[in-house]
Amino acid sequence: MERKLYRGTARERTPWWKKIILYGVYAALAGAIVFVAAFFYFAKDLPDPQNLNTMRIAQSTKIFDRTGKVLLYDIHGEEKRTVISFDQISEYLKKATIATEDAEFYSHEGIQLRGIIRGAYKTFIKNEVMQSGSTITQQLVKNSFLSPEKTFSRKIREIILAIALEKKYSKDEILEMYLNQIPYGSNTYGAEAASQLFFNKKAQDLTIAEAATLAALPQAPSYYSPYGNHVEELLGRKDYILGRMEALQMISAAEKEQAQNEKLSFSEINQQIKAPHFVMYVRDYLNEKYGEKFIETAGYSVITTLDWDLQQKAEEIVRAQTLINKKQYDAANASLVALDSINGTILAMVGSRDYFDIKNDGNVNVSVRLRSPGSALKPFVYARAFEKGLTPQTMLFDLKTEFNPNCPDTADQEKDQYGLRCYHPQNYTEKYYGPVAIKDALAQSLNVPAVKTLYLVGVDDMIQYVKKLGLTTFADKSRYGLSLVLGGGEVKLLEMASAYSIFPNEGKKITISPVAKIVSPDGENIESYAPSLEKVMEPSTAQLINAILSDNNARAPVFGEKSYLYIEGYAVAAKTGTAQDYRDAWTMGYSPDIVVGVWVGNNDNSEMKKGGAGIMAAGPIWNSMMKYTLSSYVKKPSAFTAIEFPASDKPMLNGSIVNKTTARIDKLSGLLATEQTPANLVEEKTFNQIHSILYYVDRMNFAGPPPANPQEDPLFDHFEKPVKEWVVQAQQQSLPNINEFPPTTYDTIHTDENKPKIRVIAPLENSEINISGYNFIETEIQAPLGVKQADYFIDDIFLGSSTKYPYRFNYLLPKQFSAALEEHFLTVRAYDTAQNSSEETVPLLLKNVSPLP
């Protein structure tokens, strides 16, 4: 028997699992050799850890105005740092820093393998930017003496030096160095300088809440700056850190709750900065696009779009008018934005009255915060209505109207049976103006017509429309209802100004930018702004809005002929807005060249006095800024494109509330005529009707025919009832024929049932009739309404009539009848008192017979 031959002996055959272990050992040894080699390769050029206080020299990025000559802000500037010992640093700050940056700081050896593996996975597997779960030790190395680029070799250097630091220094020494080196923003490095800057106290005296706030800053010092635009996010991160401290048993639950409720008081800002709200807005833009740490050291020259002259004037106007508003209306703050509508550049931005008044939230940039716009949103609602088929002459009734279909119409009930709020808005003047054209309703900022227009347009449709125009804050459609047009949502002043620029641009949305160009230290052009236009609105729609909002005569009945919305010698369009309970006052306006938007109110959302409406509180600021900008920046007046209002033959869309309707009326009954109505009793009559817009306009198709059953609309009765009540009042004021309704039922007199019933008794059928002597006709006639007359004919030749019972009639045949035996026809036609008629016909034979005795 042959044996099967095997290569090698049994001793040479190694089990597979042993091979895997063996290969693993080889790989580990190889990795260790590579790591040691890398360690010595990179470590030979690493700086001495003892030189941690010697920082890299970095060039600061500078922000200039549009001329490049006025320095607004130096992002890096001179560093503020005070080195203190470990025992001079608050224990709370140490714990808060560890809780948020490196919870296992006291247990690792300088690096965390999990973080390194996670960073490598994202970098090499998912192809993302180099990531790292850096420990405090690694961050110290990275911030102290490594370049900022994110490369594999730099990461290796960071890891190696972190391990070296852990070998040379204790944990407390490393944490001390870290807390003395870390940037906290505003050119401030180290815990002591940050404590002094933000809280005006030493680092060892920080409360738990203050310590958690400082610990929140290093992740993004500029973004989370207490003097920037994201204070709410800073406080949110502070609370997160307090939660981490409690979870790690660094503080108790009671201490956490107390710290969360503690009201922080930030120090006044004392540093050189021009146009501070604008500068911080630009800095946010730079940080988001290029990275915060990079911008601080890049040495860029940022040429902004800001007009320094206009900015100074804007700040001056806001400060002066706010002092007046505070006394008159309890309005302590204001914000202003000025844009060049042609190229989309930001010319001026005042975020609050005084940026440096930190105690009163002066650092808050309200121009990029959410506020209720009041009626300032109305032009966009009407613009959408025009695009769907309404006209500026469309008539709407400004009457008290309930817009919740489940609430009694025109009642003052607060909630319906489901607990939802009833909604019956009124005007700023607390008056109603009856029938009014859309052009006047918009110019005079009447509320009920605006809400009716939004109902016709549809809330969802409207939200989609304004999103296309650049208003991004109405994301959740379910939150909004018909009150949206009166300020039932929130917008940002800057976005509103941008959206308003679509009108002078005749339907085109232009990109808005605060930056004109960015230049590197060696002169390379990093970024240049090139405006782009996108058509988002029909040009004719924008032209209609321009014509309405610039018509001083149209708004005069409410605002007066010389209001703050009027600037003599210039074509300007303007719209005010006042939020519910007088919490926000707006004036938005523009010329063909510029847009100026103004908000007035209180940062804490407290109410102003009742007089603090858009026209009175925000109007003076807008008027002063607009005048100055037109004279100094625009100089040469320009006009809006003229446009004729489109004509329409549809009721209510043609400028008339009266709809003329014709109907065929039975004169006798006054009801609608039928085919049986005698022609001489049919009258073509014209009726003047007045209805609400829902009677004539189909909400699904404005330009189409009227709805077949308007009563099916859930708000039809709520729209219609106030109109009917208004008509009654108008008629009582000696205005006849203001509303005439045609009958809705048909005539019931001229019917088959009412027609006379005729029976011819004599002559009988085919009787011989004497052509030369007398003949007689005897009939029986009955009619429900009474017989009025019977007429007699032979072959349509009238013989005569009988008006009394028994309707017997004697007659001689006319001479034209011959004696020949021929068949002829006798017809008896009877009429009742209402002119109903019927007839009966009998065939006859004509013959010479003896005359009657």
Image (tube, rainbow, N blue to C red):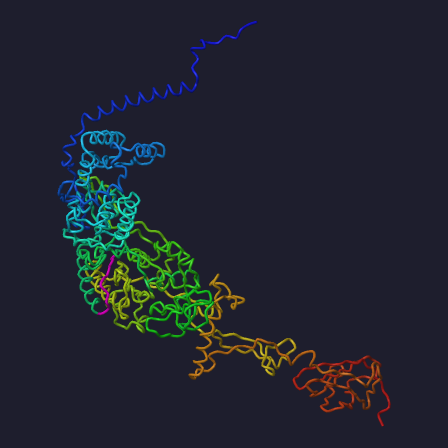
One can see residue 544 in this view: yes
Q: Percent x, y for residue 425?
A: 38, 69
Q: Is residue 332 in the magenta section? A: yes
**Which quadrant, please, contains the C terminus?**
bottom right
Front residue (pair 346, 357): 357
Front residue (pair 340, 73): 73
Q: Residue at x 43, y 61 (%)?
A: 458
Asked if 10 appears above or below 73 in the picture, the reply is above
**Which quadrant, please, contains the N terminus?**
top right
Q: Residue at x 18, y 64 (%)?
A: 320
Q: Percent x, y for residue 783?
A: 71, 85
Q: Which residues are magenta?
A: 328-338
Asked if 171 appears above or below 518 in the picture, the reply is above
Asked if 647 appears above or below 258 in the picture, the reply is below
Q: Percent x, y for residue 316?
A: 17, 61
Question: Which picture quadrant has residue 46?
Answer: top left
Q: Percent x, y for residue 613?
A: 28, 68
Residue farthest toward the top in the current orientation of the protein: 1
One can see residue 343 in this view: no
Question: Which picture quadrant has residue 60?
Answer: top left
